Image: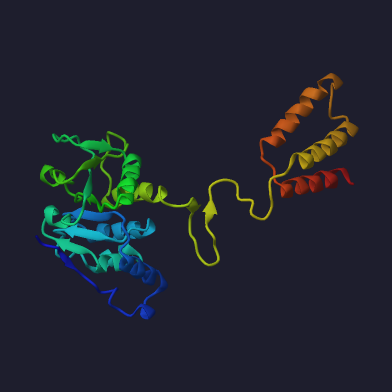
Amino acid sequence: MKTGQYLNIQITNKISEMPKKIVKIAQKIRKQENKPVIILANPQLGHNIGAVARVMANFDLYKLRLVKPRDAWSADETYSSASGASGILDNAGIFDNVGDSIFDLDTVYATTARRRDLIKEVLSPKSAAKDMKMRIQDGQKIGLLFGGEKSGLSNDELSYANTIITAPVNPEFASLNLAQAVCVIAYEFYSGITNGELGRITESDKGRIEGLPIEKTRGANKNEFIHFIEFLEKTLDDRGFFYPAEKKTMMLNNIKSMFQRQNLTQKDIKILFGIFKHIVGE
């Protein structure tokens, strides 16, 4: 059984001579962490292969295998589309057929939007990502198989897969670009293994956590909120805002609810105090 031809251009270069982005990719490839292998069957366009490499780097995947790519797949446009993820291209495995490309894997997921006459489990990208994570934790080696741009995967190629992944898409326009298809599944997998940090993480940028970012302040406590409302009530009362008087309680409750919905921070309360004091000339 063939193990494929592997290129080793970036990895064998001196790391000190590489750009920082490529150094990180080279180091990731060297570690060979147990993460899904991306397998492209019969890819036709170099810029799509490059775009796949870029998406892989976006979501921390570094093992790429190509089955019968076009002869000119490694042209300049491929590397241009990779946008810094050239190390993934340089270390891609090249295989003659799908069977050879999965020789060392335990479980293979294949992607298709079409109904096939094959009895196989079908999962959404989100469900497949959870399944992959569990299998990897059990020590399995995982492959994600994608078809070429022209006609996707053949039934023969699909027959090698344990599970089919189908994304929820517009049924009248279900075909995804190759890199887009990889992106959907890579995103779901990466989302399930991260610690919640979002976006770019560098020496100067810590990344973000979902929700309201209040690192330099804190949420206003009830004492601060009540103090502000009491000040606002007196200010409005002095200027005859609550009219007619019998509706004051209802109006004040609406005002409190309006501000409460904003999840004000301590800093917000101070700013609001400053605004209203300036308006009334205090």
Residue 77 seen in render: no
Colour scheme in the image?
rainbow
Q: In this view, does 120 lie above or below 184?
A: above
Residue at 77% across, 45% down: 272
For the question of whether residue 52 can be seen, the reply is yes
* 168 or 236: nearer the viewer: 168
In this orientation, which residue lies closer to the viewer: 209 or 34? 34
The residue lying at 15 percent from left, 56 percent from top is 103
Q: Which of 271 and 198 is in front in this view?
A: 198
Q: Which residue lies furthest to the top in this view?
A: 246
- How many numbered discs sit on the rendered protein? 0
Q: Which residue shows up at 54% across the image and 60% down it?
A: 206
Q: Quadrant of the N terminus?
A: bottom left
Give the left or right position of residue 233, taking residue 62 as reference: right
Give coordinates of residue 115: x percent, y percent: 19, 34
Q: Which of 239 and 234 is in front in this view?
A: 234
Q: Which residue lies furthest to the front in this view?
A: 138
Query: Residue 101: percent from the left, percent from the top?
Result: 16, 57
Residue 190 lies, in percent from the top left, at 39, 51
- Above or below, 37 against 256 in this view is below
